[in-house]
Image (cartoon, helix red, strand yellow):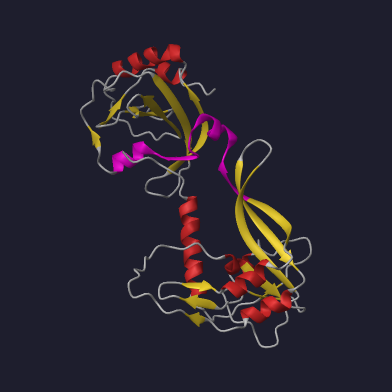
Amino acid sequence: MVRGIGTRRARLAAAGAAFFLATACGSTATATSKTPKAGTTVCDKPEVASLRPTALPAGFIAVSAYRCRSRTSKDAKGNTWDVSVEERADSRLAQFVAELRKPSQSASPDPNRACFMNALAPPEIAHVVLADRSGRLVRPTYPAIDDGCHRLPTARVNAAMRLLPWHIVGETRLSLIESAEATATGCGMGWKDMFLWEARGGQISSVAKKPVFSLAPVSMKFCIYADTHSADQYPEGTFSAGGTVPAGDVARLTALIEAAPAAHPCALHHSRFANIDVQPGNQYVYLELDGCHRLMTSDPHTLLSPAPAIIDLLTPR
């Protein structure tokens, strides 16, 4: 069974790896920008995000350095956010610039060392942008050590960067990673729409599976998702609520599911669905909360027409 998970972190990791490769290879494509007007943050400007690493121009004198990073942060309600953090340093820049202008180094590769093509996270220095008195912004290349597998910043340039008197000048919430309610209910923020996943994969059997549960259910937890209606072939729902079926209702809900007849053909599309985690045995069933109101079993995947009372028992708590 394939579970649906959020894909944003994977996209960010891929983008970061691509940026690191461009930086590590010493790209010389030059791009500059003017310092944004007062009251705006440098890091959130599209023209700054698109700057490619370049060697510092001759005569370039840095008066400010910006470090654009992201981190996770919880708010007062317990929601976890992806936050863009902008740091700035306005002094001790001469030594840092001097280190940036030094040549890269080569280390003698170990003939017995195997190089793994795993994606490395961009180093801290890859997030630095320098500004001169005219307001020109440059994302500098940096001296690196090539060990035969990777190009990494030299220890001296890293040390010079970290000695700068960085202070935070701006934080911007980018996206919600996990809501407090999702954390409390144990639900993920995203889940693949298994009805579309299995239908498009041709994995739904025309013969109703009975009994639905191979092991008698003892507990049931459910998570409700809103369909995003994305262009993705397998769209992902967004968490909206979750809860646990009261112990006294588990037997009743089990009986209703086991008594559900095979579903009739239906072409309506749902806008909300729920996955129900049944223990023991990690047994999952899925329920359309509107549209055709079908229930999908697992192993094998079959479609049933459940009684309306099943939905009534899935009350978020």
- Quarter holding the C terminus is top right
**Residue 158, percent from left and from top:** 61, 70
Depth check: give the residue in front, 316 or 67.
67
Q: Is residue 270 left or right of residue 33?
A: left
- Quarter holding the N terminus is top left
Q: Residue at x 69, y 65 (%)?
A: 42
Q: Residue at x 37, y 40 (%)?
A: 3
Q: How many marks?
A: 0
Depth check: give the residue in front, 220 or 35.
220
Query: Is-magenta flag for residue 194?
Result: yes
Depth check: give the residue in front, 200 or 176.
176
**Residue 139, percent from left and from top:** 62, 74
Is 246 placed above or below 19 here?
Answer: above
As drawn, which residue projects farthest toward the bottom?
58
Q: Is residue 149 left or right of residue 152?
A: left
**Residue 77, percent from left and from top:** 66, 35
The segment highlighted magenta reads: 174-200
